[in-house]
Image (cartoon, rainbow, N blue to C red):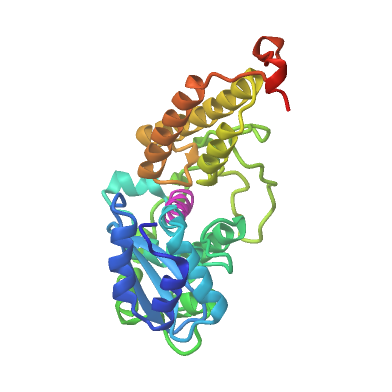
Amino acid sequence: MNGFGIELIKMMISQKKYSSITDCTKIMYPDKNANLVIQEHVGDDIRVYKESGTINILCPEKMTVVQEGALAKAIENGTIFDDADTVDNGAKYIELTTLPYKGMCDKGIDMPEKLHKMTSIVIGKMDDDGRCGQCDIDLDTGNKFYKDMINHVDNNMSVADVVTHYVGNKDGFLNNDLRRDMRSVRDEIERVQGIDHEATVSDDDWEYMSMDDPVGESTNPTDFQEGFLSRRPKKLKPIPRDVIAYITVEMNAIKDSNDQAMLAGYTCSKLELVDFYITVIDTQDSRYIVPHTRDYLVRMQTELNDLLTKILKIKPINRNDRVWKVNLPEEWRG
C-alpha cells in the first residue's frame, strides 16, 4: 500500500488527524474516484454513507480501541470503498421496493435524496471487522426504518424520533449538517404521500438467480414483521484480493503439466467471474448487486490475465520421467 501500514492509520485515527487520512487514501488508492471524508458525530457506532461521489465516515467522538482497529483495517485494505457502494445500492433497492416509484415517474417526482442518505446511514453501521452493509440484518433494518419514515412521520412521530430510534443517538442527532437535512426529509415524505402505492416496483418486476447458483450467495427467505420482501436482487459473492496471491504462490509451485492445467483452469474460472461482474455493472443489470467497484474488477482482470499468460508459458518438467535422468560418469558420483 505504497508504504502506508495499518499502524500508521491507527495512529492518525487515535490522534484524530482525519484530514491526513483523507490525503493518505488519495495516495494509497489513486485509481479511486471517491473522496473519503471522516467526521465526528454523537452516536456510538461508526457509520458509512456515500453522497455525490464522497464516502462519508461518521465516527463517535470517543472511539473504542476495537472501533479504531476496524476503521483502520477498512481503510488499509480498501474494503471501505466497496462497502460504501454496497450500502448505497442497498438504500436504492429499499427505495424502489417501498416507494410508489412508477407513480412518482408519472408525476415527475424525484427520488428523495435526503431520505436516501438517512437510510444509508442506518444500513452502513460498521462491524468489529471493519465491514458495512454485508449482513442481511442491516438491509432488513434499513427497510424497517424507511417504512417507518414514510408511514409514521407526522403520526405522533417526528423525523428525529425515527432516526434516533434506529441510529441510537440519545444526546443529539449525528452532526450539524445532517441535522439540517432532517427538514428536507419531511418535505420529501410529503411529496410521495398520496401517490398510488400499488405503483411500487413489485417482487414480480425482479428476476433472480437460482439459490444453487455458484455465483450467488444462498439466502433463506424469512417473514419479517414489517413485511419485508423475502426476495431481492441477488448479492454476488465478493472476489477477494488474496486470489491473486494464491495463484502466484501456486504458479511458483507447479511441478508438472497436471499442476499447470489445474491452475490455468482455476485462473480462467476467476476471469470468467470477473468478466461477468463487469458486464453486470456495464449493463446496469438490476438482477444483481456487485460488491465491488468497476475499477477494482478491471484491475483484477488485468492481473489475472497476466498470471494466466505466465502460467501458460511455463514448461513443467516431470522429474520422475526417465528422459530427464542423466547418467553421470562413475568418477562424478558421490
In this picture, which residue range is highlighted in magenta? Answer: 86-98
- 36 w.r.t. 81: above or below: below
Question: Is residue 58 shown left or right of residue 52?
Answer: right
Point 29% across, 74% down: residue: 19
Place of residue 80 in the rendered image (x, y in percent of width and height, measured from the top left): 44, 59
Whether residue 235 is in magenta: the answer is no
Closer to us: 46 or 71: 71
**Please, which residue is most extreme toward the bottom here?**
171
- What secondary structure is the magenta-colored segment mainly? helix
Point 37% across, 41% down: residue: 294
- 175 w.r.t. 192: above or below: below
Whether residue 92 is in magenta: the answer is yes
Point 47% across, 86% down: residue: 62
Closer to us: 62 or 73: 73
Place of residue 181 in the rendered image (x, y in percent of width and height, measured from the top left): 31, 73
Closer to us: 263 or 161: 263
Place of residue 24 in the rendered image (x, y in percent of width and height, measured from the top left): 31, 66
Q: Quadrant of the N terminus?
A: bottom left
